[in-house]
Image: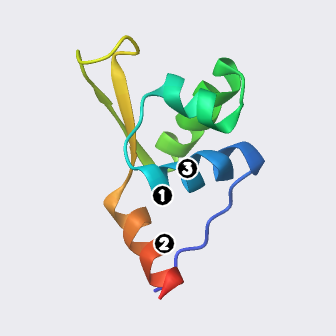
Amino acid sequence: MRMQLRLNERERKVVDLLKGAGAMTPSQISVKTLMKPSDTHDAIRRLEKDGYVVVRETADNADGSMVALTGDLRSALIQKLS
């Protein structure tokens, strides 16, 4: 079963970054994608709502959270590359 992704440009930037880099803080994502923090948070919220990313709370960084692709999305992206 193929997963159809319907992502806007900002969401695509976040997914592409996480695909290559793994889990990151929202601030790191903002810096690496050159997006405004508010745009980054909006994209992350939409991706989380759609089940593409998980946001985990952490005390290890100033953001207080880490963002990572869900297992299903990571598997679908790996299959797409195969």
Type of amino acid at the residue the image marks with label 3:
Leu
Badge 1 or badge 2: first in the primary sequence: 1
Type of amino acid at the residue the image marks with label 1:
Lys
Q: Tell me whether the residue at label 3 lies in contact with that at label 1, contact meaning CB atoms closer than 8 angstroms.
A: yes
In this rendering, which labeled residue sits more in front, label 1 or label 2? 1
Q: Is residue 30 left or right of residue 49?
A: right
Q: Residue furthest left?
A: 59
In the picture of the structure, the residue carrying the numbered disc 3 is 17
Residue 62, how many percent across, how many down? 37, 11
Splitting the image into 4 quarters, where does residue 31 fall?
Answer: top right
Residue 10, how many percent across, how many down? 71, 43
Q: Nearer the viewer, residue 54 or 26?
A: 26
At x 34%, y 16%, the residue is 64
Label 2 element class:
helix
In the picture of the structure, the residue carrying the numbered disc 2 is 77
Badge 2 or badge 3: first in the primary sequence: 3
Neighbours of disc 1 within 10 Å: few (<14), some (14-19), many (20+) = some
Query: What distance separates the C-alpha of mark 2 from that of mark 3?
Result: 12 Å
Q: Is residue 52 left or right of residue 22?
A: right
At x 32%, y 16%, the residue is 61
At x 71%, y 31%, the residue is 34
In the picture of the structure, the residue carrying the numbered disc 1 is 19
Q: Is residue 46 left or right of residue 10?
A: left
Q: Nearer the viewer, residue 69 or 81?
A: 81
Label 1 element class:
helix
Vertical placement of 67 versus 41: above or below? below
Query: What distance separates the C-alpha of mark 3 from that of mark 1?
Result: 5 Å
Label 3 element class:
helix
Splitting the image into 4 quarters, where does residue 42 fall?
Answer: top right
The colour scheme used here is rainbow
